[in-house]
Amino acid sequence: MPGTCIVGLQWGDEAKGKIVDLLTLEHDFVVRYQGGANAGHTVVRDGQTFKLSLLPSGILTSGVTCVITGGVVINPAKLLDELDGLAKQGVTECGKLLISDRAHIVFPWHFAEDRALDVSTSDGENIGTTQRGIGPCYRDKVGRSYAIRLGDMLRDTFADRVRYICDAKNSVLASMGGNHEELDAARIISNYQDFAKRLRGLVADTTETLLNAAEAGQRILFEGAQGSLLDVDHGTYPFVTSSNSSGVGVSAGAGVPGRYIDRVVGVAKAYTSRVGGGPFPTEQDNDTGQHLRDLGNEYGTVTKRPRRCGWFDAVAVRYTARLSGVDALSVMLLDVLSKLPEIQICTAYELDGQRLSTLPSHVDDLRRVKPVYETLPGWQTPITDARAMEDLPERARDYLERISQLVGRPVDIVSVGPDRDQTILARQPLSSTGTS
Ligand code: IMP
């Protein structure tokens, strides 16, 4: 069976890019299956930092085919910027890129709608979107009347379609209130025709490509964006993104049946962070939270917003590990906890006097839960040079062991710093990655 999936188990920003980068060499294809330029992944290679958003992390490896599937929503200007940025950073040998003609395109009206809607949620708490037009683009995809896919941008009917949609969207935006600039159809058509010209050579029926690859036993790495708790169907709705960001999204987004995925690596930080609105039971809006933010450099890759930080929530991660079909855990940023005298883990929730061992499905209940904590002693020793489990202080190993017990999955990978070699492989060797 040829498929591996890397999926975030919290609210995103779990440092999945590093694990994708490590596993890329074992694969022929690296595939983005959902999300858009709301995602941000940082890959550090030989001391050089690469910030990617739409491009799969595998793009830094030559010989690999990277695929942006139909489940992704594409801002073409951003995608081209990223490709140009790689060239500027001196990356000449990179993976081949294919982009699905089924992928939906983000247009200026989506940005305007995102800005207008995010300030008008009725319960007083905003979703706090990345303002990248993601939700409105997915809404139009499902609504169909005002959607444009990459394949449509390459057809003669494209200009007419944009004019028709601009007319409709100008009325929609006017009805939303606020100061919206009138959409200029001619300018949009001209800009997007330029984008289409540059992207044309990369466009493919990637569903067919990936089905052929899977059937031929080629190895495919599916790279999740955001985290499972932001999944539109199974996350902390409505404080979620607009796609299936958990493992359940792979088949729909990439068009590859689940039978071709035989390994799912769940990526979680050794603590928790969240950016944007919504309940966060283990949040530490205090000095501990600030300590984690400072040491973990917890500021959004895309929006630069400070991330909310808190303790590891084993209830939430156990739920998402089950939801995403996780085989093994990759625990990231363990080094961020190294100075703390004590570390807490949330082992259960309490709601109305009842003990809960799983995530309530309604956001109002999740808002009201009280975390039940277990306190573990900190190790208070730097661990960034550890390269094997034996190099870690016993208390750090105990912490990982407790996470593994509570989540019900083995910890296969531990990250103790941003560089590729600051990685501990706890169980199976990743032989071809060059990491020992
Ligand atoms: P949207 O995806 O821009 O619509 O934002 C919806 C929610 O998902 C907001 O709370 C965002 O902060 C969050 N979000 C979207 N993408 C990411 C990500 O890559 N990392 C963390 N949070 C994200």
Image: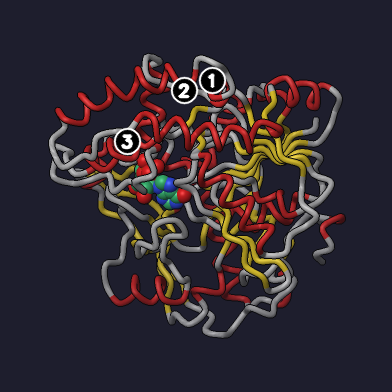
Q: Which residue is mark 2?
A: 148
Which numbered disc, 1 or 3, marks the residue closer to the eye?
1
Q: Residue at x 36, y 48 (%)?
A: 130
* Residue 232 quadrant: top left
Left or right of 127 on screen, residue 326: right
User: Which kind of residue does numbered mark 1 sit on?
Assistant: Asp
User: Which kind of residue does numbered mark 2 sit on?
Assistant: Ile
Bin the neighbour count of mark 1 within 10 Å (Cα to Cα): few under 14, some 14-19, many 20 and up: some
Q: Residue at x 55, y 27 (%)?
A: 103
- Choose the circle earlier in sequence order: 3 or 2: 2
Left or right of 8 on screen, residue 124: left
Q: Secondary structure at mark 1?
A: helix
Marks 1/3: CA–CA distance: 31 Å
Q: Is residue 10 visible?
A: no
Bin the neighbour count of mark 2 within 10 Å (Cα to Cα): few under 14, some 14-19, many 20 and up: many
Bin the neighbour count of mark 3 within 10 Å (Cα to Cα): few under 14, some 14-19, many 20 and up: some
- Choose the circle earlier in sequence order: 1 or 3: 1
Q: Residue at x 41, y 76 (%)?
A: 294
Q: Is residue 177 visible?
A: yes
- Where residue 299 appears, x then y in whole percent? 41, 65
Q: Secondary structure at mark 2?
A: loop
Marks 3/2: CA–CA distance: 26 Å
* Residue 45 quadrant: bottom right
Marks 2/1: CA–CA distance: 6 Å
Q: Which residue is mark 1?
A: 152
- Where residue 118 appears, x then y in whole percent? 24, 42
Q: Residue at x 64, y 22 (%)?
A: 255
Q: Which residue is mark 3?
A: 237
Q: Nearer the viewer, residue 100 or 326?
A: 100
- Where residue 65 appears, x then y in whole percent? 77, 40
